[in-house]
């Protein structure tokens, strides 16, 4: 007979350090672990197994684990925990820790390290774990005793859930995890918002007009009522409402107020922001170009533009929007919309793809956007689609899309996930398809197979280059072409290649209606 597992947080004595951390995290509301463990984490594997308190999801690459934790946090509004192996494993995880940090998504990483007594011998996997964690974390600590290990974990959780949300990394020497004497620690206190100043509210109200842009991010974009209030303010005052280029999450679609983003290409961004002499910021900062370009500025707002922060990233943006609407007596504004029509049969171009997605998207879907250049028409075309959530690459480190979709599906198992994935960046974390299959995630992945790093070709021209064959060979995905249907099938995900947009509509619509993962390779 299989012994029953405890269904409460009451731990038997004695308890080791790893078990005290698992039980304390669970008691504080963390119940999912995305893991790629190694030898130094076996005490955590054992504690997770014995307690049965968390859902454990294996990623075959560390970047899948951290990318999935990012997607989970964005949709669940609370962190998962990751379990990673030493400095080399943490280095593999770093790109998607970076993306989560830029998205202001909460994340707690537990990274195993050599036992304290083993550190002095320069074993093959020895390295500076804290040094590896620092560039991709807002909070880093190394545990020092089994008795205080859970307290360290609760401080990591508190840092992750602070305003704004952060990435916290707790380094766990192996002996601290296996030593007895572990004690549970209480959950961290809930975070507090920074207060909004009455003077700032009056200044914001006075600044609004046709030469003013309201730039809003963070939780505002996750709150349809806040965006509707701000669109009402914009309509009443003549101001313009925009979101940053990259964001944690949007709630959008039919019946919700639309909002445009600052464009990614620097020339378009400068043109968009050129008319404004004033800017009111809510849960964001003044926009900056992704890269430096010859003859172009780094700051995107015009020189001399007056800026005011009504609510910082540590503030309550929806409350600030409500206060400003009340101050101006502005009514919420929601534009009327109709379900987009299906595109006619023909090749899969960027506009046709966008029309297809807008038509087939079901209500309550979660869109994961790492479409890069192939999805350049998606945003505008889907404003009137069925109500949906939208999450996308936030830190520019490509390879987040497939793991984001995995995490979103774990967080919201009753909602279909549509992942719009560029072909080049898909190869960074393609292993995430295996985890989707293993977990039975309802994710439909559409690979935009233009068979090139198209965005990098644009960047090459933007710096004034005149590329030849050698340059283009570093940007084209040919000789041979990638076969994504076969790659997916090898990891347990069925799939199909399509070249006609009408067929794409039919295949994606059917896949979204069925449980489990599916991949569509859309040849563009």
Image (tube, rainbow, N blue to C red):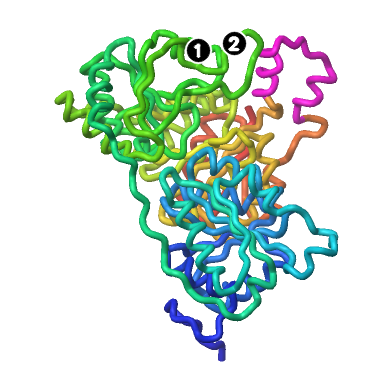
Which of these two is toward me, 52 or 366?
52
- The structure residue drawn at horizontal position 67% and vertical position 52%, both measured from the top left corner, is 130
The secondary structure type at the circle numbered 2 is: loop
- The structure residue drawn at horizontal position 44% and vertical position 28%, both measured from the top left corner, is 285
Q: Residue 80's spot in the image, x, y percent? A: 51, 57
Q: Quadrant of the N terminus?
A: bottom right
Q: Is residue 54 magenta?
A: no
Which of these two is toward me, 386 or 435?
435
Q: Which residue is mark 1?
A: 270
Which disc is residue 296 wearing? 2
Residue situated furthest left in the rendering: 329
Between disc 2 and disc 1, the foreground one is 2
Q: Residue 118's spot in the image, x, y percent? A: 79, 68
Decide: few, some or many residues near mark 1? Use Cα within 10 Å; few <14, some 14-19, many ≥20: many
Which of these two is toward me, 296 or 493?
296
Decide: few, some or many residues near mark 2? Use Cα within 10 Å; few <14, some 14-19, many ≥20: few
Task: Check if mark 2's residue and mark 1's residue have beta carbons within 8 Å.
Answer: yes
Q: Residue 512's spot in the image, x, y percent? A: 47, 46
């Amino acid at each position: 007979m299989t012994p029953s597992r405890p269904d409460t947080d009451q731990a038997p004595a004695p308890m080791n350090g790893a078990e005290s951390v698992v039980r304390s995290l669970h008691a504080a509301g963390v119940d999912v672990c995305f893991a790629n463990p190694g030898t130094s984490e076996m005490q955590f594997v054992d504690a997770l197994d014995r307690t049965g308190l968390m859902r454990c999801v294996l990623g075959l690459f560390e970047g899948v684990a951290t990318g999935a934790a990012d997607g989970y946090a964005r949709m669940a509004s609370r962190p998962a925990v990751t379990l990673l192996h030493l400095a080399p494993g943490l280095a593999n995880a770093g790109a998607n820790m970076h993306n989560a940090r830029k998205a202001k998504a909460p994340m707690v990483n537990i990274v195993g390290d050599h036992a304290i007594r083993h550190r002095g011998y320069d074993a093959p996997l020895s390295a500076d774990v804290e040094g590896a964690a620092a560039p991709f974390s807002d909070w880093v600590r190394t545990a020092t005793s089994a008795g205080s290990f859970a307290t360290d974990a609760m401080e990591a959780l508190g840092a992750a859930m602070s305003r704004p949300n952060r990435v916290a990394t707790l380094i766990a020497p192996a002996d601290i995890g296996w030593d007895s004497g572990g004690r549970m620690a209480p959950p961290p206190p809930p975070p507090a918002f920074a207060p909004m100043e009455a003077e700032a509210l009056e200044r914001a109200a006075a600044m609004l007009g046709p030469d003013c842009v309201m730039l809003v991010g963070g939780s505002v974009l996750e709150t349809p009522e806040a965006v509707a209030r701000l669109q009402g303010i914009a309509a009443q005052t003549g101001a313009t409402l925009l979101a940053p280029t990259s964001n944690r999450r949007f709630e959008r679609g039919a019946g919700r107020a639309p909002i445009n983003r600052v464009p990614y290409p620097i020339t378009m961004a400068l043109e968009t922001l050129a008319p404004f002499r004033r800017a009111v910021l809510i849960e964001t900062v003044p926009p900056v170009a992704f890269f430096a370009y010859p003859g172009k500025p780094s700051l995107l707002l015009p020189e001399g533009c007056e800026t005011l922060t009504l609510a910082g990233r540590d503030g309550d943006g929806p409350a600030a929007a409500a206060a400003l609407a009340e101050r101006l007596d502005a009514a919420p504004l929601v534009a009327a919309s109709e379900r987009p029509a299906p595109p006619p049969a023909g090749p899969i171009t960027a506009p046709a793809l966008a029309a297809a997605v807008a038509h087939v998207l079901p209500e309550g879907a979660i869109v994961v956007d790492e479409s890069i250049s192939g999805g350049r028409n998606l945003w505008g075309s889907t404003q009137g689609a069925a109500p949906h959530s939208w999450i996308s690459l936030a830190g520019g480190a490509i390879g987040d899309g497939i793991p984001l979709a995995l995490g979103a599906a774990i967080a919201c198992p009753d909602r279909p996930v549509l992942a719009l994935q560029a072909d080049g960046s898909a190869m960074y974390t393609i292993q995430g398809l295996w985890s989707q299959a293993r977990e039975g995630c309802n994710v439909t992945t559409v690979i935009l197979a233009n068979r090139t790093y198209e965005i990098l070709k644009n960047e090459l021209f933007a710096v004034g280059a005149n590329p030849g064959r050698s340059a283009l060979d570093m940007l084209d995905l040919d000789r041979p072409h990638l076969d994504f249907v076969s790659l997916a099938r090898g990891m347990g995900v069925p799939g199909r290649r399509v070249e006609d947009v009408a067929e794409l509509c039919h295949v994606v619509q059917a896949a979204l209606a069925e449980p489990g993962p599916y991949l569509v390779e859309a040849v563009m």
